[in-house]
Amino acid sequence: MSELAPRYSAAALLRARFDRHFWGPLWRRATPRDAYDVVVVGGGGHGLATAFHLARDHGLKRVAVVERKVIGYGNVGRNTTIVRSNYLLPDNFHFYEDSLRRYENLSQTLNFNVMYSSRGVVDLANSDDEMVMYARRGNAMRLAGIDAELLDRDGLRRFMPELDPSLPRRYPIVGGLLQRRGGTVRHDAVAWGYARAAAALGVDIIEECEVTGLSTAAGSATGVETSRGAIRAERVVFAVAGHTGAIGRMLGIPLPVETHLLQAMVTEPIKPLVSTVVSYMYGHAEVYMSQSDRGGLVMGGVLDGFPSYTREPLWHRLEEVVQGAVALFPQVAGLRILRHWAGTNDQTMDGSPLVGRLGYDNVFLNGGWCYGGFKAIPASGAACATLVATGQAPDLIRSFAPERFAAGRMLDEKGAGPFPLRQ
Amino acid sequence: MSSFGCPFCGPRPLEEFSFHKTLPNVPGGAFEEVYLRSDDPTDSHEHWQHRYGCRAWLYVRRNPSTGRILEVRQLTGSAP
Ligand SMILES: Cc1cc2nc3c(=O)[nH]c(=O)nc-3n(C[C@H](O)[C@H](O)[C@H](O)COP(=O)(O)OP(=O)(O)OC[C@H]3O[C@@H](n4cnc5c(N)ncnc54)[C@H](O)[C@@H]3O)c2cc1C
Ligand SMILES: [Zn+2]
């Protein structure tokens, strides 16, 4: 195995020009040691970011991330890469704003280009009533110092000339809510960047190692059982996204979670067309779209519609997304779809995350991120690391504690009630 | 999983059916019933409707890891 890639800089890049071995692997392939301070289960964005902050902010020397497949296999590599903080409820917008700020600087933090692109996120409105709802959400954000702009049709035309809002559509476009600092971040780079930065701080990244059980003694956890043997741990963090429900079952702890599929697709590359992230709800369906740097249109919609672990996306959901895309931009009708995939989401009963203790004093859950947890990764990693290292949840994630359900303090952004599919 | 056998209409495309809810599987009171799940990756008990067909309400058992439908029958008794 060649040497690890060094710290990136302009000078290093110049060196790379002459050194064929410059671009080495980004992290060491670790094999499990006997014991760790913290074992983080799940090598997605949340697990890797938690491990990175445990090592960087709290000086923990013996941290492992244990991933059953390979880094990037899960939702961190399957999402549509949208980041934003345009929420209505204060507990949500404060948290997601913290995350967006961290994304703005993440390339520097990790010394890895995550290609944050503040191209804006626009939610289109179909009716004047929807504009009223958007004004309410935008104003709530602005009162907290977060950028939001309500656009009428002319405002939309100025911001995204590629869209003709006055075309006849079954669900007309009357305006929208814009967050300019929202946009996209390259998802694979987030996974690789955190893995590389964590490994550089001494974190063991252990791939192809599935956690199959929790070892306990006298009411606390002593480690995990894995497909590669037992590993002792002072503390265990589960950050398994779509497998949160399965972990609850493994531990015998019922959770307010169901596992649902979300799918996405990308078209063949075309010349620049869509300059922003645009989201269009029409009837019961939705399309959100952005254009990748390669030129493909990256699109997604609503959840497939019933509990599933299969990762087999439904064709009729794809059709709806495409219909929405064509309603927005009629000229994309002939495009071919290059790829189409799905990921398993841990949909909670109020649509908000579950971050807190899980059954034992030294076992933690960082999950319940539903279909919107990519944008949460930097803030979640920092806050969850503080929780694990100090035992105290920082203010930013206090209302994400799983105990909120029994206490009747649901954090229901949509007001949809206890139906994970509708959240 | 691309088609569904309706007890009244026979095999029909999946998009005619809509999932309504997962049946409670955690013992306890109303709180457990409404908010908690024991997420069995191989056996899920659900209510569906043949919404864009005969509109019958159905009791469905499925394996969410393979998509296989294990049982479909008409929902009887009280409304879902
Ligand atoms: C199609 C799609 C589009 C999305 N679009 C967006 C978006 O635009 N913006 C946004 O903010 N969010 C989006 N999301 C949601 C976001 O991707 C997820 O909420 C987030 O990535 C989940 O956290 P993660 O990165 O840690 O998950 P993952 O990457 O799934 O990591 C969890 C890891 O745990 C591993 N694991 C599971 N069980 C075990 C075990 N027993 N032992 C060891 N390892 C285990 C899995 O293999 C997996 O790698 C989208 C999701 C999907 C599916
Ligand atoms: Zn029928």
Image (cartoon, helix red, strand yellow):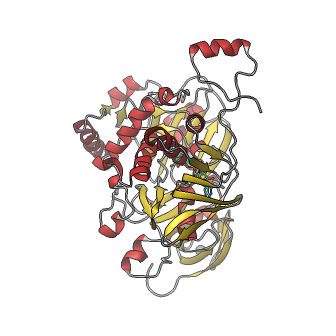
Q: Nearer the viewer, residue A16 or B3?
A: A16
Answer with the quarter of the image where residue A407 lies.
Answer: bottom left
Q: Residue at x 56, y 43 (%)?
A: A79
Task: Report the number of numbered marks.
Answer: 0
Q: Residue at x 60, y 35 (%)?
A: A196
The quarter of the picture where the C terminus of chain A appears is bottom left
User: Measured from the top left, where is residue A75 in percent x and y?
Assistant: 58, 48
The answer to whether B66 is drawn above or below residue A102 in the figure is: below
Residue A81 as seen in the image, left or right of residue A96: right
Task: Note whether residue A162 is visible.
Answer: yes
Q: Nearer the viewer, residue A309 or A6?
A: A6
Q: Nearer the viewer, residue A388 or A325?
A: A388
User: Measured from the top left, where is residue A21 in percent x and y?
Assistant: 75, 22
Residue A312 as seen in the image, left or right of residue A93: right
Residue B46 as seen in the image, left or right of residue B4: left
The quarter of the picture where the N terminus of chain A appears is top right
The answer to whether B8 is drawn above or below residue A347 in the figure is: below
